Image (spheres, helix red, strand yellow):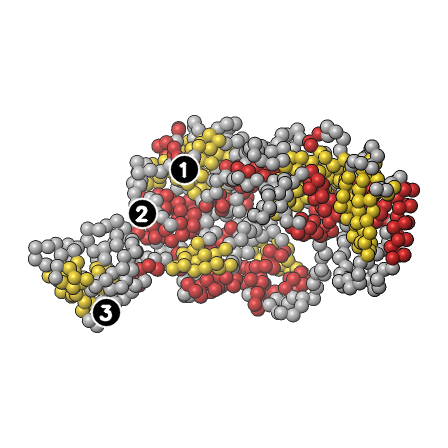
Amino acid sequence: MNASYDWLSAFVAHGRTPEQLGELIGRHVATLDGIERLRADLVPFVVGRVVETEKIPETKLSFNKVDDGSGTLLEVVCGAPNVTAGKVYPFARTGTLMPAGITIEKRKIRGFTSNGMLCSARELGLGTEHDGILELDTDAAPGTPLLDVLPIGDVRLEIDVLANRPDLLSHRGMAREVAVLTGAPLRTPAELGAPLAGAATVVGAAHATSGAVQVRVDDLDGCPAYMAVAIRGVTVGPSPDWLARRVESVVGRSINNVVDATNYLLHGYGQPMHAFDLGTLAQQTIIVRKAKPGEAIVTLDGVTRTLTPSMTVIADGARAVAVAGVMGGRDSEVTAATTDILLEVAYFAPRGVRATRRALGLNTDASYRYERGTDPRALEETLRIAASLIVAVAGGRVDGAPIHVGRAADAFAAPAVPLSRARLRTVLGTDVPPADVQRRLGSIGFSVRGTDDGWQATPPSWRVDVSRDVDLIEDVARLIGYDALPDELRPQRPGTVPDHPLHVTAQRVRDALVGAGLLEARPSPFVKGSDETHVRVANPLADDEPHLRTSLLETLARRAEYNLTRKQRAVRLFEIGSAFAKASGVLPKEEVRVGVLLMGARRPVHFTEPAPPDVDAWDAKAVGELVAAAGFPGARVKLEAADTGEPDGVLWRIVVEGTPRGVVRTVALDAPVWAASAFGVELTLGVLPSAFVADKGTHAHAEERTPPKRHFVQYAPLPVMEAAQFDLALLVADEMPAAEVERVIRRNSGDLLESLLLFDEFRGTGVPAGKRSLAWRLTFRHPERTLRDKEIDGRRSQLLKTLEKELGVIPRST
């Protein structure tokens, strides 16, 4: 949030500099990100008094002597017609950098030396007036900094307001906290007159009429409360300087007096509101309803937006004129030709505004506040303040009484929250006097009542974030000051909570893939699927991607296509994330998987060799083995070749301890002809326990796979003894996987086997039909001594006997 120092000071006389105020807010309220002095470019300018002036013959110039407070009168040539002796003006000394980027230099003009410049409003960036220099109405002495004279030298405080504190998204909300911390009273800014008085509000449960204006709320769930008042005879034009400065201090630019008045209430009081051109509303009627199927509206930004029946809209007697809580419509906006307006203020349901904002991809200051929660009991107060302000700055008169439709303000009262003294002491680690607790909570608007073991605190209407005792404890702690709490250990501290094995496994797989040179991607899990095969999201972020993916390769394929459109042919991506399947319960089944996509060159090109070959199915199979080994260390893993014609391009199935866990397959892409074939690996690491997201008893898919066990890495010293190696060339049936042979070798080689490498495959002379020759290199090493030849020969002989007995595999003779 951008907060104006001057605006905050208008709400509370805190008596602190911007830096001191920022420190106070940062220590007790919210994080201060920075302090920015507005119009810092005007710091070098001073007040200059013209002591003498005379016209330069045959020119429109004047020769002046200016007192700039330096003790020496400066000679200045000026072309403005309104230079008058005795008057004071903004003055730029020699060397001053102008807002336009020009540096003022000493120069000769028509034979006269000019040592500086008397400035116009436009030259200072304060307006468009350039017919004369800016005359200052001040008694300030020459040499006084210009920013001390003009009320434009505001300071902007950049404050990081967390999502659970929407009450701080306004100057009054922030000033309310500052008032408590400084002991100064909260007040109404002097620039505001008295709120609209007169006729009592016309109240209706679902509809009401005041004068010629009718309001009806058909969607009370989306809009529990709606207020409006008509103002006729306004003159839309520029805002007065004070209002323009207030708005510009936080949003950058002034629009017109009516819109600026609504923005004043938005940023000053935290209440979004909207002004309609009453003359454009059919039948002078407002209807708050759900959008019709296919209904469209052109919003204030000029974009035509198609609405859905889940969205709440503000409509007149013929069409939608605003998207509730998000943005108004262009056809009903206030323009220079507007004379009658309808001023709206409402409480829109946060969830509905959030869903609409996401669906439309439209972020506004109003939606930002509505979806976090506004004060439902402040509608009438802010409406009457805004109506009075508009009449003051734009003229006109209020026509009829304000209209209130929906729930009454009292219906929004929050329940009391209990807080025990024991709980407060446990969390803070210290005793806080009961009277101190009651006083501090009461100072920020809580209604506090003592009980036998603590307190019952009812939050004020603007504190929509308070629902638990820890919320109250947080308020007590921050008002005391976190630095005032004891540093010693609390009497009860939580123990160390180990990571879930599934997260440990995911990290181990991630490390293995990064080490193999792959890049991790984090695509969105939303895809364009079908309701028959995919889970539909209730409030999708985009209309064209309303479903959750069933496979990680769905979204990795889109990433690969994105790379191809940018001429990137080689892609080596992986993701560890969730895939979703339909289930009979309320929530879908969510599996944590690892997905890998390979495409293009097997390795980077080097200038000393020809282009390397593209990755193929065997590269993908190797990655599948790597992923399975990292995900399930020590488990029995087998890659089973898929049957010919297997759907979805499956080449191998990854089987872990007899359970299918994943696949290695080809991946179909929307790719240009020059693109290489793409291969994918997908392996399920585990199913998220349903207890993570909801009570098990409420869901039919409470079935959980046991996540992989923890695998602890043990470190050993580097070997110092010489290794012994021998090769085995074996005749293996074509249908027998090499991995089956490797399992037998490993199982019967003992603890001294250091590595096993398959380095050759041969078919041809000397190899019987239906078989192939596979050669492995076995490396043995003893940690403390050199192995003898007879030990190695014995192991080789025993392995050959075992392989022949268990698998029918024999050594190749030639």
Q: What's the mark number on residue 300?
A: 1
* Residue 378 percent location from the top left of the image: 47, 47
Question: For the residue marked with disc 2, what is the amino acid?
Answer: Ser
Q: Quadrant of the C terminus?
A: top right
Residue 568 figure quarter: top right
Write the residue at 52% across / 46% down. 373
Q: Secondary structure at mark 3?
A: loop
* Residue 208 percent location from the top left of the image: 45, 34
Question: Is 109 on the left-hand or right-hand side of 471?
Answer: left
Question: Is 473 on the left-hand or right-hand side of 84?
Answer: right
Can the viewer see residue 156 in this picture? Answer: yes
Q: In the rendered image, which residue does mark 2 sit on? A: 239
Q: Secondary structure at mark 1?
A: loop
Question: Is 564 on the left-hand or right-hand side of 598?
Answer: left
Distance in Å between CA atoms under marks 3 and 1: 50 Å
Q: What's the mark number on residue 69?
A: 3
